[in-house]
Each structure stands twice: as C-alpha cells, then as structure tokens.
Amino acid sequence: MCAVLLVPAGCRSIRRIGESRQSIAARRLSGQGFNAMHSDRWDVAETLFADALEVSATDDRAHWGLSESLWQRGEYDLAIEHMEQAVRLSASDPKRVQRLGRMYLNVGRLEEAQKQSQIALATSRSSADVWALRGDCLLAAGQLTDALAAYHRALAIQPDYPEVQLQTAEIYHRENRYGRLLATLDRLQDSVGAEATPVRADVLQGIAMRHAGRFAEAQKSFARAIGKDPTDASLHLEVASLMLESGHLEEAKLALTTALSIDPNSLQQDNWVERFKEQQERLALQQQVAENQTNLR
C-alpha cells in the first residue's frame, strides 16, 4: 500500500524537477536574448526568445522579449499577442501592462489602451511611464484637460521627460497658452540641450515667439528646426509666414519658393493659402493706415 502511494508522489517530484530545469534553461535563453536586444542584434534576440519558448511556453520574459523583437520589425499583431501572454503569465506586471497599453495605442486600439492604462495605474501610481501612457490615451480621446493633468503627474515624478514635455507643449499650443508653452520648452532645452530637442519643439517655440511678437527669436527657432530637417517644406512655410507677418516680403518669397521646391503640394496642407492670404490682407491694411496717417500730417 505504501509503495502505491509513493509512486505518484515520486512522479510529481520528477515532473517538478523536469519543469524546473526547463524553466532555468528558458530563463537563461531569455537572458541571452535581452543581452542581444540591448546590443541592437534583433535577429539574434528573436531567435533566442523563440528558442526559450520552445523549451518553456510559460516563460513570461521570453514572450515579452519576443514581442519586442517582433514589434521592432513591424509584426505588430503578433507582437501584441505575445505581450498579452507576457502580461497574463506575469500576473499583470505593471511594466508589461504599460507596454501592452502603449502597443494598443500605437495601432489605434484606443479602448484597449485605455483599459491597460487604468489597470497599470491601479498598481503603479508612482510610475511616470504609466502616467504618460494615461495622458496619451486621454489626449487621443480628445480629453485635453485630463490629459494635461496626467502629464503633470508624470512630470512631478520625472521632471525631465522629453516625450511628456513635448506632449504638454502641444496641448498648450492647442489652447493658445503660449507663456506656459515657452516655459515647458525652456525646461526641455535645459535638460537635453537646444541641439538635441526634437524639431517639433523648435517649431512650437517659434510659433509661441511669433505670437509674443518676438520675431527675431522666432526666426532663430525656425532656423534651428530647418537645420535639423531641411527637407521639411512646412518648416520653410513657417519662416515664410513669419517673414510676411513681420513685413519682410522678399525673405517671405524666398522661403516660400524653397518650400515649393521641396514639395510643390505643400501649400495644400494646413490651410497655408488661407493663412498667407490673411497675412497679406492684414499687411495691406497696415500699409493703408500708415499712408493715411502720413497724408493727414
């Protein structure tokens, strides 16, 4: 009778030993995969993560790593499937939940991204990345006030967070709060340096400077943006708009010509024709007023 009882126990013990060895082997392969990934050897990393899953299909790290590798080469749907597995097997580890939410958001699955951001916040409210995801979800849903609040929570945790600082500046731009926009971008420049700021940050700074009537500083911001990406026609259109607004007609024509040489269809975007027309009408009115004042003297 004792022998009968011992056999199942022994089998379970042997099975656990086998599973433990598989788990250790899978973890070792996953660790090698992450080393390859951090060295930008994505093909090697993908192979190692796949090998790890062959050894143990329940290795959450292997699913996570394979997901990142697949995402890197554009296999978004399959990458999301593996990240979903990583979340499930890790008992909803906040970092994996946050990453899954980011993936959902990047492919336009907003409702699912919102859900993951809320799940992550429930267990990790001190994570700047989680608050950043929450802000991005709210921004995508058009909830600017709530998005801004989430971004401020992220920045309270991690003051120097370029992606969040830029998103915050975008909201200030949409709300015409140019003073706050400039303060946000000043902090961004202080943390990464003017030459390392994104082109969009330079553009937003130029727009804010223009609205403040600081045309020379606006021109410098647009020039810095063009230096980083000279093939973007919209940047030259910003300069043309600025030059026209400040009454420098020849410089405006030159910038407009440059923009059209880069992209002949650039004027059809972002209401540039209407913007130039309004500025020309305003400039003509100012000149007429000035002439009338001169004639009255």
Image (cartoon, rainbow, N blue to C red):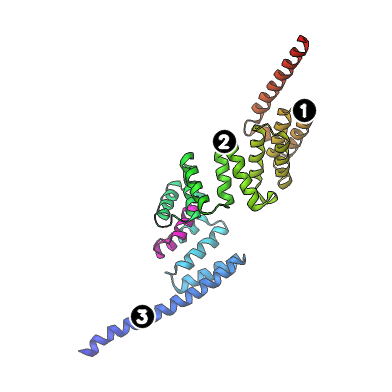
Where is residue 225 shown, x and y percent of the image? 70, 44
Where is residue 132 shown, x and y percent of the image? 50, 50
Q: Is residue 124 above or below residue 38?
A: above
**Could you say which is closer to the camera, residue 167 or residue 2?**
167
Where is mark 2, residue-wise? 177
- Label 2 is placed on what type of residue? Arg
- Label 1 is placed on what type of residue? Leu
Where is mark 1, residue-wise? 249
Q: Quadrant of the C terminus?
A: top right
Q: Earlier in the sequence, mark 3 or mark 2?
A: 3
Q: Please rate how many residues cluster around mark 3, counting C-alpha atoms within 10 Å: few if below 14, some from 14 to 19, many from 20.
A: few
Q: Earlier in the sequence, mark 3 or mark 1?
A: 3
**Could you say which is closer to the camera, residue 77 or residue 192?**
192
Residue 110 seen in render: yes
Q: Is residue 72 above or below residue 244?
A: below
Residue beneath the point at 60% across and 42% down: 183
**Marks 3/1: CA–CA distance:** 82 Å
- Give the overall secondary structure of the magenta segment: helix
- In the picture, residue 120 is in which quadrant? bottom left
- Label 3 is placed on what type of residue? Arg
